[in-house]
Amino acid sequence: MIAQCGAKTRSGGRCKRAPLVGGSRCRLHGGASPQARQAAHLRLVERQALSLLERESIAPMTDPLSALQRLAGEALRLKDYFGERLAALQQLRYEGRAGEQLRSEVALFERALDRAQRFALDLAKLKLEDRLVAVSEAQGRMLAQCVEAALQAVGLEDRLDLRAEIAQQLRLVTPTDEPRQPRAWR
């Protein structure tokens, strides 16, 4: 919290008044204006929300793309669940026992279907595949720069057979958890 108004006085010094609660300016330097009061109120509410999150031990979202993918997966599972329930009720419908429940299950299924569609559209708009490819390419360039720098550091930057062997070893690396046995160096 700011203990002193952030405005400058006519003499060039800093204003010594206290700012309004949640604000950064005193009443005389614009702290009482409607937009300054609104910004101060927003800062106070944000501080309260953050302290509540800390008190409840809720971790902040660090990877929104992964969170969106998880939410989309949950929406799809919910849609599948209500689809299965709806199919089970369709069989009961002909026995005359599930009229009202069938209508509510249909409404829930349609709502879950709409949510799943919205998540799928949001994910498609983000072009995640393109972004992941760009990240992989950037990682590959960084790895190549590191290898080049290491070869230069040991004075082996001119050995083409060493570069070919490094390329071969990199092709052997698999994305599985089990490491492959590297070939012996020549």
Image (spheres, helix red, strand yellow):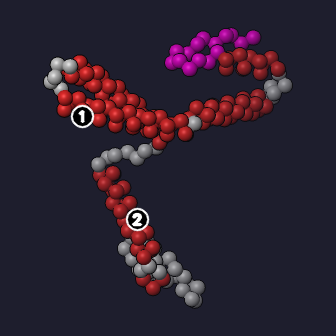
Residue 150, picture quadrant: top right
Residue 122 at x, y percent in the picture: 49, 39
Within 10 Å of the Cα at label 2, are there few (<14), some (14-19), or many (20+) other Cα atoms? some
Tell me the mark number nearer the camera, choosing from 1 and 2. 1
Query: Would you say residue 143 sits in the magenta stretch?
Result: no
Mark 1 = which residue? 104
Residue 48, picture quadrant: bottom left
Side of 104 relative to 118 (left or right): left
Quarter in which the C terminus is drawn: top right
User: Would residue 156 be visible to someone looking at this image?
Assistant: yes
Distance Cα–Cα, label 1 vs label 2: 42 Å
Residues shaded magenta = 172-186
Q: Which mark is residue 65?
A: none
Determine the residue positioned at 45% across, 37% down.
119
Residue 143 at x, y percent in the picture: 68, 31
**What amino acid type is highlighted by mark number 1?**
Ser
